[in-house]
Amino acid sequence: MQPDVFFIAHEVLIRTGIFLFLFVLIGAVEVIVPRRRPTVPKRGRWANNIGMMLLTTGLIRLTVPITAVAAASFANEHGWGLFHHVQVPVVLAVVGSVITLDLIIYLQHVLVHAVPILWRIHRVHHADPEYDVTTGIRFHPIEIVLSLAIKLTAVVLLGTPVSAVVLFEAILNGMAMFNHGNIRLPVSWDRILRGVLVTPDMHRVHHSPETDELNANFGFNISLWDKMFGTYRAQPRMGHENMRIGIEEFRARKDVISLPGMLALPFRKKVPATVK
């Protein structure tokens, strides 16, 4: 079986297997070496964050007729995209695609903070009053649809190899859970890792309600983008144990923890975009 055929045939199994393994692993590490003491009971919050993810996944499967892998396969069959017009080794095309897609995700993240109507949708993710592995899977269905549209466009324009799409999706999902993890890493490990990757301590700053911290550390995978574009902030001013998490305008549990409240949050009172 050719690699692309294998990935197309087993995409769901591969992604689901990696997701479940990392979710359980990171959740267990959070219990063993937590960075912060939780202030909100896990049971209801986890159930609703996971419920949001399952609802979103189901809606995407029912309403979106194509996946990123299928888009990549279609583009490859028709010779569409950059990597079908620039002769490079397959390995370089895969690495280049993963890095470029990560940059696009970074820019998309900046955009959803800057545009008021997009911030209304994205704030569902930021309104979580705690910060742990389930925060990394808590996104409103509308945001996931918009993100998928951007991703499909990028995959076709790049002529991304199918294997690169599967690899990128696995990395993105895994890193989103890792860097949202309530994990205490040794300071030396964090310093070394954030030279290349986004660590939990680095991304946690972004979940502060303070505007200057909220508008920092947009990256999900590669830490280079924040440093390159001037959006990097090393630490929160109040320290990781004392910093507040969430959005000050939305603190009621019915709005930020219940599934109906999260789904309705984009349609509640106006809150300006965060990037000034």
Image (cartoon, grey):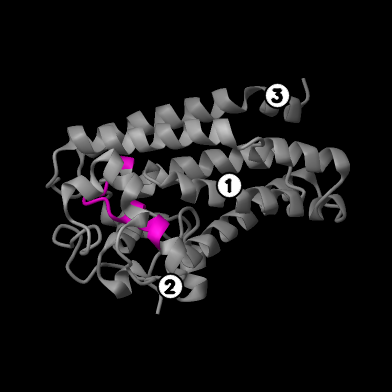
Q: In this view of the protein, which residue sits in the foreground, 65 or 113?
A: 65
Q: Tell me the chief SS of the magenta region.
A: helix
Q: In this view of the protein, which residue sits in the foreground, 29 or 69?
A: 69
37 w.r.t. 272: above or below: above
Q: Position of residue 55 (x, y in %)?
A: 42, 33
Q: Residue at x 78, y 44 (%)?
A: 90
Is any part of residue 184 visible from this angle? no
In the picture, measured across the screen, residue 230 lies left or right of residue 103, that is left
For disc 1, the marked residue is: 148
In the picture, measured across the screen, residue 238 lies left or right of residue 235, that is left
Q: CA distance from mark 1 to mark 3?
A: 22 Å
Q: Earlier in the sequence, mark 1 or mark 2?
A: 1
Q: Residue at x 24, y 58 (%)?
A: 246
Is any part of residue 271 visible from this angle? yes
Q: Position of residue 188 (x, y in %)?
A: 31, 56
Which residues, given as a range, are shown in magenta? 120-134
Q: Earlier in the sequence, mark 1 or mark 3?
A: 3
Find numbered disc 3 in the image and state the secondary structure of the residue it sits on: helix
For disc 3, the marked residue is: 6
For disc 2, the marked residue is: 231
Quarter placement of the C terminus: bottom left
Which kind of residue does numbered mark 1 sit on?
A: Leu
Q: CA distance from mark 3 to mark 2?
A: 39 Å
Q: Earlier in the sequence, mark 3 or mark 2?
A: 3
